[in-house]
Amino acid sequence: MNSSPEDRRSARVGLAYDERMCLHATPDGESHPENPERIRAIWRKLEAEGIPDRCILLKIKEAEDAIIASVHTRNHIKLIRNISSKKFDSRRLRIASKLNSIYFNEGSSKAAYLAAGTVIEATENVANGNLDSAIAVVRPPGHHAEADEAMGFCLFNNVAIAASYLLNERAELGMRRILIVDWDVHHGNGTQNMFYSDPRVLYFSVHRFDFGSFYPAGSDGSHCMIGEDQGVGYNINVPWEHGQCGDADYLAVWDHILIPVAEAYNPDIILISAGFDAAMGDPLGGCCVTPYGYSVMLKRLMKFADGKIVLALEGGYNLNSLANSVFACAKTLLEGSPIVGNFEGRPFESTWRVINEVRNELKTYWPVFSIDLPKEILIANAERYPIQAGINSSSDSDVEKDLEPSNAINFSSNNVGDLILPLSKLNVDDGDFGELSPLRSQQNQPAPTENPKEVTTETCNDLFHWRSSLSKVDVWYGSYGSNMWKPRLLCYIEGGKVEGMRKPCRGAMDKTPPKDISWKSVPHRLFFARSYTDTWGHGGVAFLNPQSNINDKSYMCIYRITLEQFNDLLIQENVTTEHFESPLVDSRDIEFLVKNSFMSVESIKGGWYSNILYLGEQDGIPILTMTCSISDVEKFKSGELPVCAPAKAYENALLKGLLEGKELSSEEAIGYLKDAVARNL
Ligand code: Q9C
Ligand code: ZN
């Protein structure tokens, strides 16, 4: 039997593109991954394949301020409106330099308003039924843009604006539940924050996280970020532990997280933050999703919301991968089935771990996650490329992209790559590293050579030179907080997390456990302050008053580790994921501390534990701890900063430390902590 004409009718797919979005470009023509050629390449490919003829082309218009204002602040809108005006000619560069990964030129305003307007237009026409689905080929992208700040190549948060428009201005269209699927390789921090307490928007993102070191670094992209208040359960992050993830990994996440949740949520419309920087060959993403992979991911979403789907371009920086992927998506929407293709390989072992963690975290909100994954899945997949999670000091994975999956065991991070360079190639002087030597002067770059390859190698060696020197210097790291519990301290060395911690640590580059452990007491006051940490949630965190007083006594577990490990610990304690090319504390700093007994130095500006305190020595090795600055103590005393009792999980870690160290009886330990909480500073 023949199918009716109605059945064969191809889908009404909207397509939106406007050359004027190419006006946004770097001011002096410097090359940049987020450049006008991206959308030109997409459009050329779609035209070459005859796609525009099969679609409904949308009229492009600029977004109205009133609509943008539902997710952005007046100040931010004003800045983006004015940034391209003559009046700002002299200030544009300076303003951009204060923002995170942003440039502006005379065309930025126009392009930003057009990008937002285009996504609104596409979304409105899908919501009201004029179109079945739509693709908005826009730039600048949007998902990193925060309410009050441009960031990560994003000026206005196009997708968030469109979602908010449907909810707040077009309620009559009945789009009461909006699913945002963010498959850009980066976490969409802006979109997450805008709807964090709003159950009308389910934000789902799968992204590289690399334990918090991948852009936009920090803990926003952690699977622990599940929404708050009314919106709890309606924010779902799937954080990859490393690059190289491909079709098999993404589709496993679709099968075991996204599709079951979409079934339960039953969205009225799906907006896709469709970055294609997880595509194979992308210079920033380091992942390997194929056009076929994108096509299947999209097709699986088309059974929801009556097929109402809008794709809005976010990232994607390899022009060929980008154009081919968008083409695959357009074809899928038009034809209702995936493009021809197949994929090999299985998900990484880490992928199953991540899927399990996400399901666990959310199972109280999504009952379908309470069903355990079949055990066989977990066992059968333990073989594929065993990737070691390593810390990665650079956000963009430009080194990894050259590597084949078969090399995966060696790739895990730029840093590890540097570590396995033969020592003889490292620029290390052969001095006695036990001696305190002035290391800062060694940061000078060597003269570049003619051979570009060699320049890179030299630069790498130089960047990490301090590590090889400081790995030969031992210090005692003195801990008085949760690190007194050895398994928790080991998280900072080996990576991972222990009971009570909300997110894993990256670990140090050198994962050798402490060479020795001992206890001592010090004449400094222990107190608890600061109301929230990513690791422990709400509740105080321990500090030692850097000023000593013989009437004070605090217990301290000291670990003998290398100065390199101490630096890696310090950076983790301060939740800084900055590029970290030189040590925060080197032998010269210690020399200074030793000379001025009981003095402290501030190693990083702004960190809570930025203050390094020298507490004498043991076995000829200096004892160092980290705490807040003296000026912070003053603020705690005056009440300008709140003191606050420790969170239960955090207090438990401290207790376990004190008990396992056999320093105090259980009653004594409880009394000791109680006293630290209760006494005035
Ligand atoms: N080391 C989008 O894909 N990278 N934005 C900064 C600093 C910024 C990506 C690297 C990447 C932004 C929309
Ligand atoms: Zn991206």
Image (cartoon, rainbow, N blue to C red):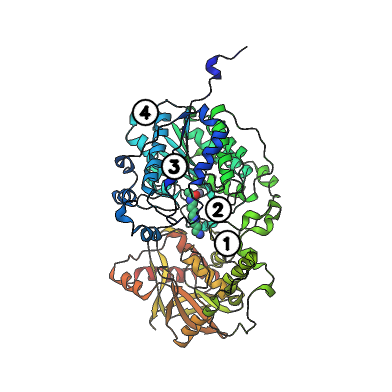
Residue density around tag 3, few if under 14, some if 14–19, many if 20 or more, within 10 Å:
many
Residue for badge 2: 284
In space, the residues marked 3 and 4 are separated at their CA atoms by 22 Å
Q: Check mark 4 vs ligand 1: CB closer than 8 Å? yes or no.
A: no
Which circle, 4 or 2, is nearer the viewer?
2
Crowd band around label 1 with a 10 angstrom C-alpha radius: few (<14), some (14–19), many (20+): many
Q: Mark 2 or mark 3: which is in front?
A: 2
Q: In the rendered view, does 6 fall on the left or right side of 373? A: left
Label 1 or label 3, whichever comes before in sequence order: 3
Residue 345 is situated, as x and y percent measured from the top left of the image, at: 69, 44
Measured Cα–Cα span from mark 1 to mark 3? 29 Å
Q: Mark 2 and mark 3: span between their CA atoms? A: 28 Å
Q: Secondary structure at mark 4?
A: helix
Which residue is under mark 1?
391
Q: Going from the N terminus, do you reach mark 4 or mark 2 first?
A: 4
Residue beneath disc 4: 173
Residue on which disc 3 sits: 234
Element type where label 3 sits in the image: loop
